[in-house]
Image (cartoon, coloured by chain):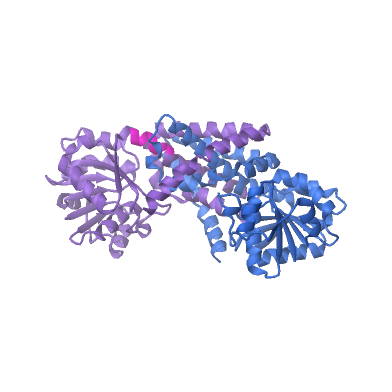
Chain colours: A blue, B purple
C-alpha cells in the first residue's frame, strides 16, 4: 500500500510512524512546505521518500492531509482532482465543517473521508512525532454517508491498526462539541500564560513559586500558533460561544469572591468536582 | 523530637510521612476535626497517636498547622498560648498575609515561623498523602525577621530534610505572586470544568471527544472546596487583580477571534509560547 502524507508535523508524522509499526508492506511518501521538515521526516523514518503534492497524491492509495486546517480547506479540491480512481483521501484536521463543505461540491466527494483523531501534544514538527500518539485515543469519523463504503472501510481499518476507537458524528456536531472540550482549553491556557507573562514584566520573580498546578493548566500554551490560529478562525462561531460561556462563568466566580460568599464559592467548586467522573473516563480509555 | 500536626489531610499528612522517612526519633501526634480522618491517619502511619488541640500543642517541640487557611487565622493565637516555652509553631497555608497579621500582636509571635511549601495535588484527605510530595519543591518562608533565629533554624532543617528548596519573602509579596501562579490556575480550571459541565446538560455526549489537553487544563477542578474557598477569601484583593487581568486577556483574545485576525492571533500565541522557559524551569527543579 502506498500512502502520501501532506504535512509532516506532529500529527502527520505520528500517523505514519504508528501505521508503519503495524504494516510492513507500507511505502510512505511525504510533502511539507518547509523543505527541512521533509528532510528531517525522512531521516527519522517517518517517510520513505520526499515527493511533491502532485506526484505524491497521484501515486498513492491513501492520501493524508495533515496541514493546518486553513490549508486543508484550500488543498482538498486540488487533492481530489489528482487522486487515483480508487484512491482515498482523508484529512486529520481539528475542525470538520468547513473542510467537509469545501469537498462537498467536488464530483469525487465520495472518495474523501473526514476524520479527526483526537490526539496531540503541546509540541510540534516532525521531531515531536511518535508512533503511539494515537493509541487508545478516540477518532471521530464525520458524515460517513457522504463517502463510498469501500473508502470508509479502508479508513476504519487504518485507524484500527493505530488502535484508535472510532466514533461517528455529523461534522456540525463535531465542531460544536470540540469547541468546548478542546479549543476552549487551548484559549484558557494561552490566556493564562499571557496574563502571568505580562505580570512578570513588573514582578520579575513571579515564577519562583510556580509549581505543578500552574504547569498543568498552562501546558497547552506551548502549542503551535500556525496550527491553532486557523482552527479558531474555522470554528469561529462555536469557539466564541464556548468562550463567552467561559468568560460568563469566570465573571460569576469573580462576583462570588468579591462578595466573600464562601458558601456559594464552595458550592460552585463542589458541583464542579463532578469533573472527576469525566477525567476518570479519559484515564480509563487512555490506559486501556 | 515531638511533633503535633493540626489537620491530617494531603498537606499535613505528606509533611509527616516525609519527615518520618528521614528521622527515626520522631513522635508525631495529630488532630483533625473529622474523627475518621484522625483514625485513618493513624492506621496509615501518618501519626503515632491521636491527640487533642490543647494536649498536642502543649507537649510538642514543633506544632504544624495544616488546616484550611481560615481556620489557621482563628487557631494561631490559641496555639501560641498553648505552645511550650521553646516550642515552635509553623503553618503550611497557601496564603500568608492574614495569618502573619493574626500572629503579629501575640506576645509570642517570635516562636511562629510562616511557611508555605508549594506542593500539592488535586486530591485531598489523609489517604491522598504521600512521603515524597514535597521533595524538590519550593518552600517559601515569610517575614523571617519576625521569628527567633533558633526557631527559623529548626524549621529550615525540617524542610531541608523534606528535600525542599527554601526561598525567603515578605508575606505581602508572597500573596501577590501566588495569586497569579497558583490561585488563578485553580479558578481558571474550576471555571472551565463548570462551563463544560453546564454544556453537557444540553449536549450529553460532549465528553466523548475530551482528551489529554482538556484533562490537563481541568485537573485542578478536582481540588477541595473546603481548602480553596477560604484561600480565595483571604487573598481576595490579589485574586481579584489576577482574575481581572485574566478576564481582560480572554476578552482581547475573543476580539481577535471575532475579527478573524489570524495575524494578531498568531502573535499572541507566539509571544505566549515563551512560557516554555518557565515550564522547563519547573521541570528541571522537580526532577533535580
Determine the residue positioned at 40% across, 39% down.
A207
Residue B34 is situated, as x and y percent measured from the top left of the image, at 32, 55
Q: Is residue B176 magenta?
A: yes
Answer yes or no: is residue A254 visible.
no
Which of these two is toward me, A126 or A94?
A126
Residue A231 is situated, as x and y percent measured from the top left of the image, at 66, 43
Q: Is residue A202 magenta?
A: no
Magenta residues (range): B173-180
In the image, residue A3 sits, relative to residue B143, either above or below, namely: below
In the image, farthest residue toward the left: B85
Which of these two is toward me, A280 or A78?
A78
Q: Is residue B280 found left or right of B273 in the rendered image?
A: left
Answer yes or no: is residue A207 visible.
yes
Determine the residue positioned at 55% across, 54% down.
B212
Residue B238 is situated, as x and y percent measured from the top left of the image, at 40, 32
Secondary structure mostly seen in the magenta stretch: helix
Identify the image quadrant of residue A152.
bottom right
Amino acid at each position: 500500500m502506498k500512502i502520501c502524507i501532506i504535512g509532516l508535523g506532529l500529527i502527520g508524522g505520528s500517523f505514519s510512524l504508528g501505521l508503519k509499526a503495524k504494516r510492513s508492506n507500507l511505502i510512505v511518501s511525504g510533502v511539507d512546505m518547509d523543505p527541512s521538515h521533509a528532510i528531517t521526516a525522512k531521516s527519522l523514518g517517518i517517510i520513505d521518500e520526499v515527493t511533491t503534492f502532485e506526484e505524491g497524491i497521484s501515486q498513492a492509495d491513501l492520501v493524508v492531509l495533515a496541514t493546518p486546517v486553513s490549508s486543508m480547506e484550500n488543498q482538498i479540491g486540488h487533492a481530489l482532482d489528482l487522486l487515483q480512481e480508487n484512491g482515498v483521501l482523508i484529512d486529520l484536521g481539528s475542525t470538520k465543517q468547513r473542510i467537509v463543505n469545501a469537498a462537498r461540491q467536488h464530483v469525487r466527494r465520495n472518495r474523501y473521508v473526514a476524520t479527526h483523531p483526537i490526539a496531540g501534544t503541546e509540541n510540534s514538527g516532525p521531531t515531536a512525532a511518535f508512533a503511539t500518539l494515537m493509541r487508545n485515543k478516540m477518532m471521530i469519523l464525520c458524515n460517513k454517508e457522504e463517502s463510498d463504503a469501500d473508502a470508509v472501510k479502508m479508513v476504519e481499518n487504518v485507524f484500527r491498526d493505530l488502535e484508535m476507537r472510532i466514533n461517528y458524528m455529523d461534522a456540525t456536531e463535531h465542531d460544536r462539541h470540540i469547541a468546548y472540550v478542546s479549543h476552549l482549553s487551548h484559549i484558557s491556557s494561552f490566556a493564562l500564560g499571557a496574563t502571568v507573562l505580562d505580570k512578570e514584566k513588573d514582578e520579575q520573580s513571579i515564577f519562583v513559586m510556580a509549581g505543578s498546578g500552574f504547569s498543568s493548566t498552562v501546558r497547552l500554551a506551548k502549542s503551535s500558533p500556525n496550527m491553532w490560529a486557523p482552527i479558531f478562525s474555522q470554528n469561529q462561531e462555536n469557539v466564541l460561544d464556548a468562550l463567552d460561556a467561559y468568560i460568563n462563568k469566570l465573571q460569576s466566580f469573580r462576583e462570588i469572591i468579591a462578595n466573600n460568599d464562601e458558601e456559594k464559592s464552595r458550592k460552585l467548586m463542589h458541583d464542579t468536582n463532578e469533573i472527576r467522573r469525566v477525567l476518570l473516563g479519559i484515564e480509563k480509555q487512555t490506559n486501556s
